[in-house]
Image (cartoon, rainbow, N blue to C red):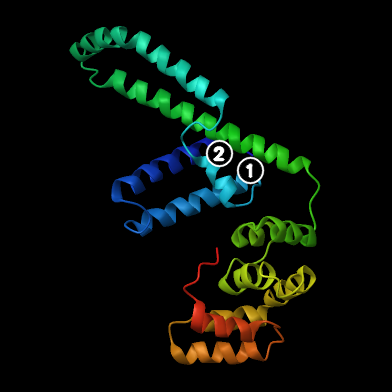
Amino acid sequence: MNTDDAKSQIHILLDLQAELNNYGGAEEAPAIWGDYVTQRSLLFKQFGLPETSVNFKLLDPLPMTNIEVRGINLSALFDNQRTGEFHQLKDILTQAGIIGFTEDQKYDHKKELIVNRIFDRLYLRAKNLHKLPRPSLMEILEFGKEEKVSAADLLILMGFFNEPYQRFLINIILYRGYTTTVEVRRELIRAQDLTNVWGFVELYSNFLWEKRMGADSLRMSGLRFIDSYLWWENNCFNEIII
């Protein structure tokens, strides 16, 4: 991992987040949101971290621990003590034609603190994660079932596609006790087969004839729960399965 590259990417993420806030969020600025997601993926790859909702919280620019809070408070105290000096410097620098220098320096200093804080969080999380033995797919599924972990997070950790059918298998079939973790693991592996992947691409098409072709193909695929999923898609698709 290149430290300078990682910090540069964090700078870009903070700028994109500020833009998103200005425009009112991802729904109001989908192009900016797309850039943000791309940069976030690149950053997480630098650290070898999975893109899970828990890890996303590490990118929060606000302090998260007592140690971080104390660091920010000390920085704020330092800034307050220097306020009078900055005002005096501003007059001198303005006369010299260096307008806005002190404000920029103060802003950059605070932003750099945030960048360093986020970098340290990601670095420590990656360091701790890479020390741990890799859990098996069964262990991850069993833990997810017990703790009702987000299906999207489990799928990412296991290396499976994070798509509606896969989330259906975990949130509906597994978490509600319709089958065992062993059978869900088998079904997730079957769903990764290239032929089945293409069937799902057709199923999620906006064209009715392609959707029908995809559904017919998937019914012939051997996927055990595809009929249940197709019924659920037609009757309960608005149910949240994250």
Q: Looking at the picture, tell me which residue is in the foreground, 54 or 98.
A: 54
Residue drawn at x 59%, y 46% as measured from the top left: 55
Residue 201 occupies which quadrant of the picture? bottom right
**In the drawing, what numbered circle is on residue 6?**
2
The answer to whether residue 3 of the structure is visible from this angle is: no
Q: Position of residue 33 (x, y in %)?
A: 41, 54
Name the residue rendered at 29%, 50% in the picture. 23
Amino acid type, label 1? Phe
3D distance between C-alphas at marks 1 and 2 = 8 Å
Could you say which disc has been placed on residue 47 in the image? 1
Quarter of the picture containing the N terminus is top right
Please name the amino acid that badge 2 sits on. Answer: Ala
Up-down relation of residue 108 to residue 134 (above or below)? above
Q: Which mark identifies residue 204?
A: none
Looking at the image, is 223 positioned above or below residue 153? below
| In this picture, residue 87 sits left or right of residue 64 | left
Q: Which quarter shows the C terminus?
A: bottom right
Residue 92 in the image: state x and y as whole percent: 23, 8
Q: Is residue 228 above or below residue 165?
A: below
Label pair 1/2, CB-CB below 8 angstroms: yes
